[in-house]
Amino acid sequence: MIQDDLSRDAEARLTAVRDRIARAAGVAKRAPADVTLIAVSKTHDAAAIRPLLAAGVRDFGENRVQEAQAKWPALREDNPDARLHLIGQLQSNKAADAVALADAIHSVDRPSLVEALARAIAAQGRAPDCFLQINIGAEPQKGGCAIDELPALLRQARDAGLPIAGLMCIPPAELEPAPYLALCAKLARDHDLKGLSMGMSDDLETAVTLGATHVRVGSALFGARR
């Protein structure tokens, strides 16, 4: 009975989020299918994840390699088509583990990490999609490369053979997100990048109307973080 309640709650939350994406996409005259919903499952256990898998969600986001390693091999046994996105800051010494585990890495933000990922990709023969993370609000406590460092980092990543999918950003929490998301979208256009990983539970509508291709949604799907 408890599992039935969890499943119904997960389906209701998922329906609400998908409706929000669809409405925002309609405003922007975009197809909702062009927006990938990433369920941010960091800090949530397998029991909380399985109902969303059963409801059809296939893209999930984790912050830490170690946490993902503990949860996802078993979850993927029953759901081999599930895609794992690493969205948190990645240490260079975890690059090989990240390449082995992830389908996409959203936090490529410095030359040393580009080098470590390139070595891991060459050694393993698998290449996750890579998003370059921009510190869009120039916040010292956040990861991401500075805006003026983006051209050099992008050039290095392309020269190293990383499959660059696009840009990722997290706008300042206490400010209106639209200007920051619009700036990220402009930077992507300026550098001929198609992917935009931006938008979370509170601002996904703004992100979708401004061109997000991937939205990272945690609390709206899972409830408050544990």
Image (spheres, rainbow, N blue to C red):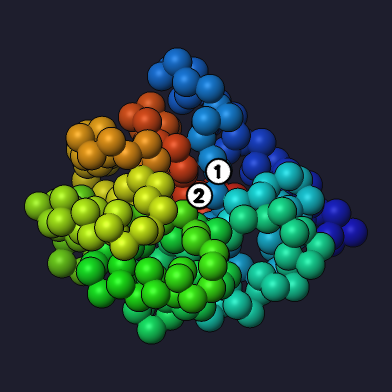
User: Which residue is found at the position 27% from the left and 63% from the top?
Assistant: 109
User: Which residue is found at the position 37% from the left and 31% from the top?
Assistant: 211
Frontmost residue, 123 versus 68: 123
Q: Position of residue 8 (x, y in %)?
A: 78, 47
In this view, which residue lies farthest toward the bottom? 93
Q: Position of residue 140 (x, y in %)?
A: 15, 67
Indicate which disc residue 37 carries.
1
In this view, which residue lies farthest toward the right? 1
Give, as a three-letter code, the residue at label 1. Leu
Give, as a three-letter code, the residue at label 2. Val
Classify residue 50 by image quadrant.
Answer: bottom right
Q: Neighbour class for label 2 at 10 Å: few (<14), some, many (≥20)?
A: many
Are dots 2 and 1 in contact, CB under 8 Å? Answer: yes
- Could you say whether the residue bearing mark 1 is in a helix, strand or loop? strand
- Could you say whether the residue bearing mark 2 is in a helix, strand or loop? strand
Classify residue 116 by image quadrant.
Answer: bottom left
